Image (cartoon, rainbow, N blue to C red):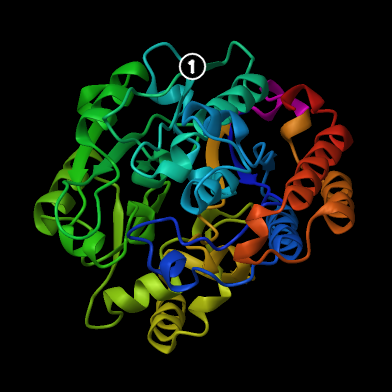
Amino acid sequence: MLTEINFDGIIGPSHNYAGLSRGNIASASNAGDVSQPRAAALQGIDKMRHNLALGLPQGFFMPLDRPDTRWLETLGTTEEGAEAHLRAQAWSASSMWAANAATVSPAPDSADGKCHLTVANLVTMPHRSHEWPGTLAQLRLAFANPAFAVHAPIPAPFGDEGAANHMRLCSGHDAAGVEIFVYGLSGGRFPARQHLDASKAIARHHRLDPARTLFIRQSDTAIQGGAFHNDVVAVANEHVLFTHETAFEDREAAHAEIRAAFPAVEIVEVPTSAVTLPDAIKSYLFNAQLVSLPEGGMGLVLPTEAQDTPAVWTWLEAHVAGNGPIRKLLPVNVRQSMANGGGPACLRLRIVADPATVDPRFIADAAKLDRIAAVVAKHWPEAIAPGDLASATLAGEVRKARAALLEALDLSILA
């Protein structure tokens, strides 16, 4: 009964463009713009509807309580008294990017036969460093069944940013796989967010077989070019690794190591000569959901920005026409998320599990998504400008909006 379930983060009512994510080009480029939280959340819900229509199991996570006054209190300040940059970090809705919620190892990979989840500490970025307590509470509620083992975060200073830097190759989602942890080394103008020691600690906690566990260095070129997570330049699904030529520091050695560990791998590499790294990052070609379709074959759920980038769309159409492993191109509109630096893959956490073992309150169906959309349409702010973060009235409205969603889904325990 094991199947891959995509859990999307519902985009919260405090969604705003504060430009807090150093190394994320889209986030920096749109800093100070007026955001549209209602439109953003509805776009995310439509993406979930789209995946349900494909026949893919779908779950979701709740937005966290924002602004985070408890975090401000640890800094000796309040919503009213906080400096502007601290206030913005307390308002951040970045938990919407569920790929950074945790690293997940399915039961077939672990020595104890459990699905292991380690909540990400996200310590590299201040605005994300205070997410993990709220995320951990949700994970422990959603995956309370004994089929799961949910772990506390790896301690600082070992930076861990979750599944965005983790890939898995397998013959099928329910089969034992090879897990690939991609890490970076600090240096240059942008920080490497995933530390090797954090990745190794997670592998030990998840009781993975060392012979089927790889640690591969992300290229400095990719990081300094704006690929702040590996999933901006590479994504894997079952036997396919879809990657940009510049993804790994030692490309040939990385490919050889992957082939040795999983000989059935099909590496689909996009050369720089066809798609430059800036075009790959601008379009989020690789920050896409590479999914196994129920009717067979694989589809690529990718942002509409990929269609708007000629080199990217030309390569994709040629790949499909050439009978490559990606058989369908499935664009979705997540422009509000993209403007803050997160594509379709950022918005979801992949968990291989028996859906019957997951708390049903976190599992989506059409009626439940309609219920969520109705709450969003009624309660989410239409727009947030940078100066609005100082508004106590808006802060109250944001909290009431989240409370209304929790109540509608019988999840007020998370309040």
Residue that numbered label 1 is attached to: 114
Residue drawn at the location 35% of the way across and 57% of the way down: 22
Is 107 drawn above or below residue 350 in the view shown? Answer: above
The quadrant where residue 301 appears: bottom right
- Asked if residue 69 lies left or right of residue 224, the reply is right
Q: Position of residue 190 (x, y in %)?
A: 25, 57
Which residue ends up furthest to the front in the rendered image? Answer: 81
Q: Nearer the viewer, residue 258 or 360?
A: 360
Badge 1 amino acid: Lys
Q: Quadrant of residue 234?
A: bottom left
Q: Is residue 357 magenta?
A: yes
Q: Which residues are magenta?
A: 353-360
State whether residue 25 appears in this view.
yes
Q: Position of residue 214 (x, y in %)?
A: 22, 36
Residue 178 x/y as whole percent: 31, 35
Quadrant of the frame with the C terminus: top right
Q: Residues within 10 Å of mark 1 (few under 14, many from 20)?
A: many
Q: Secondary structure at mark 1?
A: loop
Q: Is 33 situated above or below 289?
A: below
What residue is drawn where x is 90% and y is 55%? 378
Relative depth, front residue between 394 and 312: 394
Q: Position of residue 188 (x, y in %)?
A: 15, 58
124 relative to 46, above or below = above
